[in-house]
Amino acid sequence: MYQDPERWGITLQTYVQLTMLDRHVSAISAPVRMMERSIFSAKYIFVENLFRSGKMPEVDYAVLTEWFDWITTNISIPVDLIVYLQTSPQTCYERLKQRCREEEKVIPLEHLESIHQLYEEWLIKRTSSFLPAPVLVIPADHDLQSMLHRYEENRDRILAASYH
């Protein structure tokens, strides 16, 4: 997808939308469902980024948007809380390099900057027409020990959201 987004963008994002929908609506036995990403972030961040960057044709964007709109209109997808780990693109880039995953080696800093901007627009500036839940912002440009402390500080708020 990163090497040829014009060809693989619609394929990947259609599959992501399907798998995210499945994760949202599948039965769970635990009292809390946590997801790293959602059908909403797929649409408002990753599909939007492909379209704005000119890497997704308008017709593909329109089809994905129609599917997204149909899904969110006709299927109940309850979200109690969005936890935004607000991290600078530079920190994300450094962490990406440290992980040293083969598939991530082709991701430029500019891509992370675009993604960051879309998250800021959606979750902080709230320029999108739809926000499915309250947003808890946790600054995340810190080392692992600091982050563990921040997670623990917010633990009750994060877990309590699922009981409302």
Image (spheres, grey):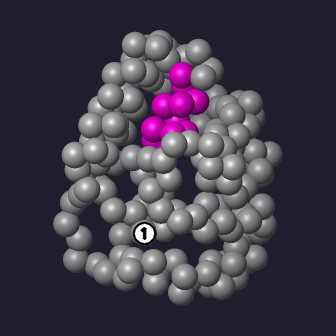
Q: Hey, which quadrant is residue 83 in on the image?
A: bottom right
Between 75 and 156, the residue placed more toward the observer is 75
Question: Measuring 48% from the left and 25% from the top, which residue is drawn there?
Answer: 1
Residue under label 1, please give it. 80
List x then y, in percent, for residue 93: 73, 44
Does dot 1 land on a helix, a strand or a loop? loop
Question: Measuring 30% from the left and 32% from the top, which residue is drawn there?
Answer: 67
Between 25 and 93, the residue placed more toward the observer is 25
Q: Hey, which quadrant is residue 18 in on the image?
A: top left
Is residue 97 visible to us here? no
List x then y, in percent, for residue 30: 29, 78
List x then y, in percent, for residue 17: 34, 39
**47 in the magenta segment:** yes
Give the overall secondary structure of the magenta segment.
helix
List x then y, in percent, for residue 49: 58, 30
Is residue 33 visible to us here? yes
Question: Alpha-carbon neighbours of circle 1 within 10 Å: few (<14), some, or many (≥20)?
Answer: some
Q: Is residue 29 above or below residue 101?
A: below
Q: In which quarter of the image is the C terminus?
A: bottom left
State which region is magenta.
Answer: 41-51
**62 in the magenta segment:** no
Q: In this view, does 158 lie to the left or right of 10?
A: right
The extreme front residue here reads 129
Q: In this view, does 96 lie above or below 7?
A: below
Q: Is residue 89 left or right of residue 82?
A: right
Between 78 and 15, the residue placed more toward the observer is 78
